[in-house]
Each structure stands twice: as structure tokens, then as C-alpha cells.
Image: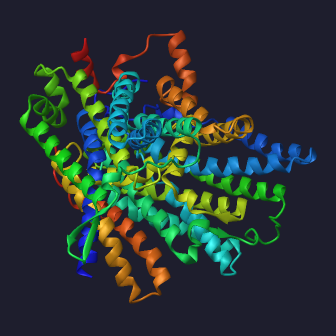
Amino acid sequence: MNPTPFNTAGAVQTPFTQGLPGPWTAILVAVALAIYPLIMSSLGQDFYINLGSRVLIFALAASALNLALGYGGMISLGHAAFLGIGGYVVAVLANNGVYGAWLSFPLAIGMAAATAALIGVVSLRTKGVYFIMITLAFAQVFYYLAISLPDFGGDDGLQMSARSTVPGLDLSSALSFYFFVFFTAGLAFVLLYRLVASRFGRAIVAIRENERRMAAIGYPVMRLKLAAFTLSGGLCGLAGALLANASTSITPHTLTWHQSGLLIVMVILGGSGYFWGGLTGAAVYLLLEETIADHTEHWNLVLGALLLFIVMAAPNGVMSLRQQLAKLLGRKPESDATPLAVTANEGEAK
Amino acid sequence: MTYLIIEQLLNGLQYGLMLFLLAAGLTLVFGIMDLINLAHGSLYMIGAFLAAAFYQAIGSFFPALLLAIVFTALIGIILERLLYRHLQRMSHLSQVLATFALILIANETVKIIFGAQPLMIGMPASLSGAIEIVPDELYYPSYRLLIIVVGLAVALGLYLLVNRTRIGMWMRAGASNPDMTAVMGVRIKPLFTFVFALGAALCALAGALLGPLLAVSVGMGESILIPAFEVIVIGGIGSMRGALVGSLLVGMIDTVGKLILTLGLRTVFDSATASTLGPTLASMSVSLLMVAVLYFRPTGLFPARG
């Protein structure tokens, strides 16, 4: 890590190379995720296959948020809106007799991306805390919409009588649905990889590190950020479409700011700005929830304590612990990493 | 009809002033400490639960209110010393996460101690009636009037504190430029602790006062947190005047907007649809107001920094 003196306060410090996995890691992860349901299926554990599907869906949502938050440095507290929009598009279409995934999925992605573009145009004018609050306010608007429109089922949400239909595939069994999620999310992950490895990906990381300098060099900063935010929203919409299918229902709870918070939690648990951060975070979160909720009803207390610990001990996520460890064993921690404004306050205390 | 609107205006004033109690603390903590505190609503919830617990123990409203304020302020001081002081040095993202974690912890702890059932606080008997404002036409509950009076008194007190005292001068200086304030010799750490305790006390006051009107329940902090945030963003982070104007604006739009929108929608939809759509549209319009303010004035109506 070699921070420039122009570091903006609060920027997530991830060197660019650590944001990209090697090809072997990707193959290994893919093979493991493909074998997992086969083992569970031979053991007759449909429950764990469904859990796997949920992990993959939230991995996709968290990775989508990671593109905006981790790579782009845009702290959105409103990504639940895109998740919810994707889910509601699929559920509303299903309630009107349209089950074909060929129509509902692109529409879900398109609606979520279009909404993200609109929200982005307004929100990206603001910075810092104001950006956090404005994304939150937008998400609240969609939450209020969902609970009040009778066509959307109000507080109860919408039920689907069956999962979406894909030609030549029956999604009703746990195993086939898992592989549908696996391939859909897999495609999205390939896309995400191509994105962050491209010039575009490098540009948004650079904007995160120093927006003013990028603008001065002549990059269209606003357009790049908007593109990243829109793509992030669209992919979140895809996750929402899958999520509605997983439980064949969607409720306004998907749109709450609590859900937006949980998505951030997953990104941070995994490591923001790391390619596998979303997957790791979703897996760690859902598996912890599953194990701990079995033993105590106070899962949220455990989660809260764990989160506090992580924020204090590893602010860049679990994936960054490796570096932290190396830092502890090898060389002294770099003190320059603290933002300028803070140093002034600390100087006063001494 | 006119009286209905007057009554709703009073309700809007009452809701706005209660929002102000939360927003005042939030905007000071935000402005002076540059700290985004999602758990501010939890202090409000804790204040309400403490007031309910003390009320059940001693059976009298005002002493319970005072005890709740003192204990919530103490909790605020402890939190500031243990947690917020360190969070302040971290990124906004870390602050969001840590205070989100605090919400989870506070909700679960309150659930463990007080149970999942909502608690009730009894209104003081002398205030349970209604006052006749216009003979035979307009009655208004005296308890709600008390809330309005207390809210106005606190607003005036805060105005005097911020604008007429030395501590207030430090607070304004801190909100405008904390580093420079520290360099000029203001001991800013005790000031942070004081501001945080004040914010917590105001939360408890709002929570305890609203206790008899609402059910004291676990999720109550989150439902008022979002409007409180909208208020301070509309008003401009760190600005007390902005918090007051924003609170009244949001309170009026939410309360009066509900009535007008519901009545207006009745002409188009059937009354059942109108009475669910109206309140929602009012809540949405508050969010949209905030979006509009941020679009045209990205630092709020009354920017404190600059």
C-alpha cells in the first residue's frame, strides 16, 4: 500500500491488483460451487441446496454493490431498492400470467438499471454523507410505493404460484434451480470480472482514489461513475429476480433500509474492492446466520457484536486480514494511511 | 373543515417539534464530530423504554421523564467515550456499519430486557383531557399542547445556548471548522462528550414525551430516524436553524399532506384506496423534498460549513 498524499478522507484503500483474482482461483471456486449441490443431492439434503442458491443470489447482489461501493467508492445505502425492483417485476409479471424468464428477467434488469441511472443522475451530484442519505431517501420512496399499492400486495407482498419458466429446464426442483442460479450468477460474475479488469474498471478505481485528479486528466468522471452505478443497480435487479424465484414470493421487507444495510455488511464482511468480496461476504453472513440462529433467537445481537469487532479490527473486510497479518509480522503499520483531517484532530489530543 | 385543518396543523407542529428534538442532536453530532450516527434513533427508543420502566416502577409521569433523560444522557456519555470517539477517526463507511451494528445490539438488548410486547406509559391525569380552543368547534388534547409547549421551550433554550453562550460559540465554531477550532485552543473532546450527552438527553425527552401517544416498541427508533435524517439533510448538516426549519417543514408536509392528499384522492379513488395511498404519498413527498433540496442546494438550505 502506498497512499498518495492526495487521498480523500474515507476512501477504501485497496491496491488495484488485489481487486482481481487469478484464473485458477476462479476455476477452483466454480468447480467447488458446482460439486457442492451434487454432494448435497446425493445426501438428500435439499435444504442445503436451497441455502446454496440463496448464498449465490446474495453473492451476486453483494458483488453488484461491491462494484459501486468497493471499486467505485460510492457508498449507497439504497441498493435494496434495486433488489426489490427486480423481484417485484418478476412477481408482478407472474401474477399477470407471464412466467417466461426470457421476458421477465431482462425486464427486471432493465427496470433496475433504469432506476439506478435516474437515481444516479441526481445522487452523484452530492458527495460523502449527503450521497449516503440521498440513496437512502430514494430507496424509502420505493419502499413506501410497495407497501401502499394494492396491486403490489401491500404489506404482505406478492406470491407467485410457480417459478419462472426457462425453455428446456424445469426449475421446480432445488437442484435444477441451483444450477440455474449458478449459471446466471456465473455469467454475471464473468461480466463483472471483465468490467473491473477493463480500462473502465481501472478508471473507476482511480476515481475512487482521486476524483479531482482524474477529472483534471480529462476523464468523464460523472459519466463513468453513473455507468458503474447503473450497472451495479442492474445486476442487483437480476439478483432480485432470482430472489423472488427462490422463495416464489416477494415482500416489502426486501426494500427496507435494513436490507440495504445488510448488503453493505456483506460487502464489508467479504472485503470491499476485492473481487470475491461479495461471494465471501454473502457466504459468511448466511452461513453464520444459519448456524447461530439454530442456537439462539438473539442472532442480531451476535451479528451486531461481530460487526462492531470487524469495523474496529479489520475495517477493510475479512479479505484484508491476510495483509493485516503480514503487516503485523513483517513491517510496521503505515501511519500515513490516516486521512489528513484526522491527523489534525489527533495532534490536538497529544 | 377549517377546524380539521387547524387541528392537523397543530398535529404537524407537534410532530415537527418532536422531530426537531431528534434532529437537533443529530445535526450537532453530525456537524461538529463529522460522525454519521444511525443509532440516534436507538437512543430515542432507549429513552422511551427507560421512561416506561421508571413509570411502571414509580407510577408518576414527570419524575419518570426526568430519570429517563438523565440515564439516557449517561448512556450517551458512555457510548461516546467507548465507541464514538474512535469511530470519529474512521471513514463514513465504518461509521455507517458500526452504528448499524449498534442498532441491532440495542434492539436485541431491549427485546431481551423488556420483552417483545410494546409497553404503555400512562398520561398524567391532569393532562388527559382536551382544551376547548374554539367553543364547541375545536377541542385539542391538552397533552399534545404540552408537547408543543415543551418543544417550543426546548427550541428557544437551544437557540439561546447555541447563540448566546460560550459553549454555544464553541459548538458553532466546531460545526464550521473543527480543526481550526481545536487550533484556536478550544478543548474539543469534552465538547464532543457534552454535545453527545445533550443529543442523547433530547432523544430521551422526545421518546418519553411521545410514549403515551405511541406504543413504546422495539422498532420505534428506526421509524423516526429516517425523517430525522431527512430533516437535517434538508436543513443543512450542522445548522440548528436548518434543523428547526427542516423539522417544521417535514412535520407539516407529513401531517397536513396526509389529510390533503387523502381528501384529494377521494375525488378520484374510492375512500379505502385513498386512505392507504394518502399517507404513503405524504411520506414519499418528504423523501422527494429532500431529493429536490439536495439537487438544487447540495449542502442543504442553511449550510453550516463554508
Residue A63 seen: yes
Quadrant in which the N terminus of chain B is drawn: bottom left
Task: Return the x and y of residue A163 as percentages of the image width and height.
Answer: 75, 68
Q: Classify residue A134 as left or right of residue A262.
A: left
Tally the numbered discs. 0
Where residue B64 sits, quadrant-wise, is top left
Q: Quadrant of residue B179?
A: top left
On screen, residue B277 above or below B168: below
Vertical side of B276 occupied by A68: above or below: above
Q: Residue at x 77, y 54 (%)?
A: A178
- The location of residue B274, given as percent across then percent down, is 44, 80
For residue B97, side relative to residue A35 (left or right): left
Coloring basis for residues: rainbow
Residue ID at (36%, 57%): A223
Location of the C terminus of chain B (image quadrant): top left
Residue A80 in the image: x percent, y percent? 52, 55
In the image, is residue A112 above or below residue B153?
below
**In the picture provided, is A194 more to the left or to the right than B138?**
right
Q: Residue at x 82, y 56 (%)?
A: A174
Residue at image point 86% right, 44% down: A40
Q: Is residue A190 visible?
A: no
Q: Nearer the viewer, residue B66 or B20?
A: B66
Q: Give x and y (percent) for residue B110.
A: 53, 38
Q: Residue furthest left?
A: B164
Residue furthest to the front in view is B126
Nearest to the observer: residue A173 or residue A253: A253
